[in-house]
Image (cartoon, helix red, strand yellow):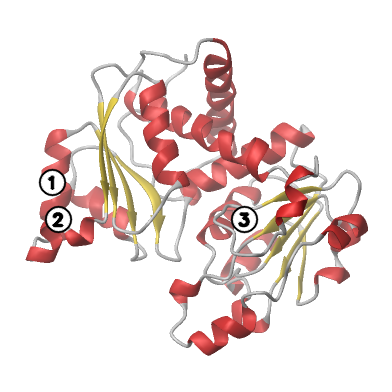
Amino acid sequence: MKHNKYYKADILSAGQFTKEDVELVIEHATEMREVVRTKDYSDILRGKIMTALFYEPSSRTFGSFIAAMQRLGGGFIPLQGVLYSSVSKGETFSDTIQTFASYSDVIVIRHPQIGAAKTAAEVSDKPIINAGDGVGEHPSQALLDLFTIKDHFGNIDGITITFVGDLLNGRTVHSLVTLLSLYKPKVINFVAPAELRMPEDLVGQIQKTGVQTQVVETLDEVLGSSDVLYITRVQKERFRDLDVYERLKHRYVITKETMQAAKKTAVLMHPFPRIGEIETAIDSDPRALYIREQMPNGMYIRMALLSLVLGEK
C-alpha cells in the first residue's frame, strides 16, 4: 500500500479530500465489502479502541461505526446521550474529549454545534472523525453516498443529480455537494422551498467547476431528467417556529406516481431517517437504493475510514 496520509489523521470535513483521496476510500470500501461478504470479519484493528461520543441522537451512523469497528476486530466505547452524563454536572467539552482520548485510539463524535469536531481535534491527541456537527457537515455520509452513486452507475461524470427537501439544514447534502465538486456531473438540481434553499456559497462552489445547476421549488421541473433523486427530510429540530415546520414538512413526498414519471434508470436515495418523504410502497422498487445499497455502504465506508486512520502508515 502506498503512503497513507490519513494514518492517525482527523476526518473533519468533506473539503479536506482530494479526488485521489475519495477514490482511495472507495477502493478500500469495496475491499471491505468483499471481506464482509466472504469472511464476515477481519482482525486488522485488533487491540484498537474507538469511542463513539454522540451528543445528538443517532441510530444508523452510531450503529454502523460500531459495526464497522467490530467487523475489523476492534473494541468500542458507545456513548449516546452524553448531555445527560458528566456534561450535565458542568464538565467542559475539552475535558470530555481528553478523557476519552486517554481511553481510546480514535473518537467518533456527533455534536449539535457546527465546528465541534474541529474543536475536539484541537484538544485531542487521538484522531477525531466527524459524524455530524449540527447543520454543518457529515463527511462519512457524503462518502457513502458518493460510493453508492459511483458503484451503481460506474461513474459520477455525466449524470444529473437532484437534491430535494431541506437543503438549508441538510449537512449530508452540504458534504456531498463538496465531494461532487471534485467530479463532472452533468447537472445538479436543488429542489427546495424558498425557506430551505441550499446555501448560496455551496451552490457557487459547484458552479465554479463548470457544472450546470438549477435552483427550483417544484420537483416536476427536473424529475424527468434526473438520474439520482436524493431526498432529505425537513428537520424539525432545526426550527424555532414549529408552524413553519408543519407547513413545509410534507412539501415533497415521493409516491408511486412520482416514480412512474421518473426515468426507468433513475435511482432514489435518502440519508434517513425518513419522516414521510418517501412512501413505504416505494421500498420494493428496484430503483430505491436507500435500504438495499446505501445503508450497508455506510458500514463499508466507515470500515474503510477506520482502517485508514488506525491501520498502516
Question: Label 1 vs label 2: CA separation?
Answer: 6 Å
Residue at 64 percent across and 52 percent down: it is: 181
> Which label is found at residue 94?
2
Residue ID for mark 1: 98
Measured as percent of width and height from the top left, residue 145 is found at 61, 44
What type is the residue that disc 3 sits on? Val
Return the residue nearer the eye: 267 or 154: 267
- The mark nearer the N terminus, 1 or 3, is 1
Q: What amino acid type should be assigned to the residue bearing mark 2? A: Ser
Instruction: Specify the amino acid type for callout 1.
Output: Gln
Q: Is residue 266 left or right of residue 112?
A: right
> In the rendered structure, are the residues bearing label 1 and label 3 in contact, judged by CB atoms less than 8 Å apart?
no
Q: Farthest residue to the front: give it.
A: 281
Q: Quick check: can you spot residue 5?
A: no
Q: Earlier in the sequence, mark 3 or mark 2?
A: 2
Q: Element type at marker 1?
A: helix
Q: From what the image shows, is residue 14 above or below residue 297?
A: below
